Image: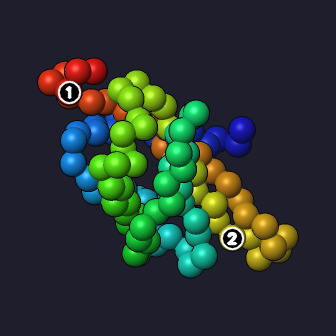
Amino acid sequence: MIGWEPLRDVMSITKGDLIFSRTRSEGPIPTGTVIEIIWDDGPTWLATSIAGNTVGWRIESAELAAIDSGDTFTIWVRYPNGDTETTDDYEWIKGSAQRPLDEGF
């Protein structure tokens, strides 16, 4: 590892759709970048929007049903690499899901 430390986050999941965004403090996200949330033992959610230095997701409530409180995820950023025609992949944010206690979790 060359000095890269992923951020830590908790994703609060309730009964409705999940709409949220994260901002890259270093500036605009390069064109062609793919950002996705990969759940350990679960689904992968591609970003629904990338604009400037902000990435956003809108996840329908039906998709959220598979995520339990405590499930862990990683948000991967895959920058295009023009020299190798592949991507440079970075763990941007790691975290876990949290559901309110009134939902039985």
Where residue 62 sits in the image (x, y, percent)?
34, 49
Residue 91 appears in the figure: yes
Per the model, the C-alpha gap separating discs 2 and 1 is 41 Å
Q: Colour scheme in the image?
A: rainbow
Q: Quadrant of the N terminus?
A: top right
Relative to 83, is 94 above or below? above
Q: Which mark is residue 103?
A: 1
Q: Residue furthest left?
A: 102
Could you tell whether 52 is left or right of 92 in the image? left
- Looking at numbered disc 2 in the image, what kind of residue is underneath it? Pro
Q: Residue at 46% x, 63% y: name it.
A: 47
Determine which residue is flagged by label 2. 80
Q: Which mark is residue 19?
A: none
Q: Residues within 10 Å of mark 1 (few under 14, many from 20)?
A: few
Q: Residue at 28% x, 38% y: name it.
A: 12
Could you tell whether 100 is left or right of 29 in the image? left
Where residue 83 sits in the image (x, y, percent)?
82, 74
Q: Residue at 27% x, 30% y: name it.
A: 99
Residue 53 appears in the figure: no
- Numbered disc 2: secondary structure: strand
In the foreground, 17 or 48: 17
Where residue 76 sits in the image (x, y, percent)?
57, 51
> Quadrant location of residue 51?
bottom left
- Numbered disc 1: secondary structure: helix
- Looking at numbered disc 1 in the image, what kind of residue is underneath it? Glu
Could you tell whether 6 is left or right of 88 in the image? left
Could you tell whether 91 is left or right of 62 in the image? right
Q: Quadrant of the C terminus?
A: top left
